[in-house]
Image (tube, rainbow, N blue to C red):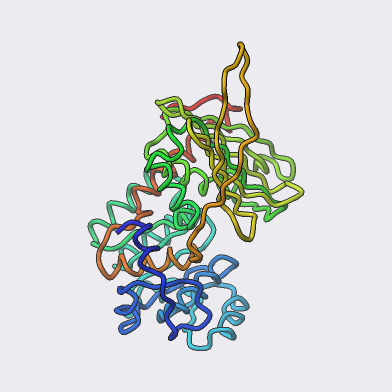
Amino acid sequence: MNLATIHENTNQKISRIPNTKYATNKQLDIHMKTPISVAIAGCGYWGSNHVRVMHELGCAITLCDTDTSRIGSLQEKFPDVKTTTSYSDILSNDTIDAVVISTPAETHYDLAKKALISGKHVLVEKPMALEPIQATELINLSQRQNTTLMVGHLMRFHPAIIKLKELVDNGELGKLQYMYSTRLNMGKVRREENALWSFAPHDISITLHLKGKLPKRVSATGGAYLQPSIADVSLSSMEFDDGTRSHIFVSWLHPYKEQKLVVVGEHKMAVFDDSQPVDKLGLFDREINFIDGNFVTNKPQRYSVSLAKNEPLVTENLHFLNCIRTRENPITNGEEGLKVLTVLKACQESLIKGGYPTNL
């Protein structure tokens, strides 16, 4: 089942779950009768969002974090959750079906590997590992264990990206020529990874999804201004074999927040502005005429594109639970995570070399 179908089938809210921002499909009814038991490893800012959503979805939840204050704060909001400060407790608990890993990136591979070995289904946040060989190992391990391995590429579940992919596939934009994305903000500054690794996986995932293939060449430049050797800003470029180019600009040292994607096709152009509270996706006519030896352009008119109102994290988590139920291969499976990691690693190599291109 593709994401468009998921969204199409999820138009009726379930009254049994309060304050829910999603609409459900028939598989959720099965889940509600026999909830899946999920452990959330890492209960910081993003992990706490997983706790909220999984709780809304009726899962039996166990919180795992070494910070007892985080656990205590969440337990006040969700008194029925279980807690532990030991990841080993999660692995040895046969009643826990799945683990959501929302810890620092350098721990993802080790925690995911241990969970898969223990027979747990795994949803691991991006990047799934720091090295492609580690990602490959996780993929092979999940196949041997017959468990679900899914990577948290959240933007793949955003209604605007789902719709944009439909527009690309049905030829509305024409042949893609170039894409430009920005993911900028003031903070959150990290010490364990640079802005490229922190922000760019989202946009790499979107770019590969829209193109349906890997680029043939990438390059990246950046600058470290707050901490030695940790880039606060980076500009990555991807070149595809059909001439399409993509540029990804990320920074946590920027005076205002901007999350925008521009997609230019030979017929039309699209702009996804995730910083806007509503009306996030627009289409623009592309009219360029050659008159008397000169190019003449008209200011393009914007047409709003209506979108589903599903919360991406709810759609993502529901998809994970349904894949566990049905053994369907996740949309953002390990292979998808490996492709994103391969491009990310190549960009990092180019960044280290001062922008020298890296061939894939």
Q: Left or right: where does residue 269 sit relative to residue 337?
A: right
Residue drawn at x 37%, y 78% as measured from the top left: 37
Residue drawn at x 61%, y 19% as measured from the top left: 295
Image vertical order of residue 309 relative to residue 90, above or below: above
Q: Quadrant of the N terminus?
A: bottom left
The front one of 230 and 75 is: 75
Residue 26 can be seen, yes or no: yes
Q: Left or right: where does residue 212 sit relative to residue 41?
A: left
Q: Quadrant of the C terminus?
A: top left
Extreme residue in the top direction = 293
Residue drawn at x 24%, y 61% as measured from the top left: 145
Extreme residue in the bottom direction = 79
Residue 118 can be seen, yes or no: no
Count every numbered label the image shows and give the total: 0
Residue drawn at x 53%, y 88% as measured from the top left: 79
| Residue 23 position by quadrant | bottom left
The front one of 132 and 169 is: 169
x and y percentages locating residue 80 in the rendered image: 48, 88
x and y percentages locating residue 265 in the rendered image: 49, 34
The front one of 62 and 163 is: 163
The front one of 219 and 82 is: 219
x and y percentages locating residue 270 in the rendered image: 54, 42
x and y percentages locating residue 25 in the rendered image: 34, 72
Image vertical order of residue 289 relative to residue 258, above or below: above
Extreme residue in the right direction = 255
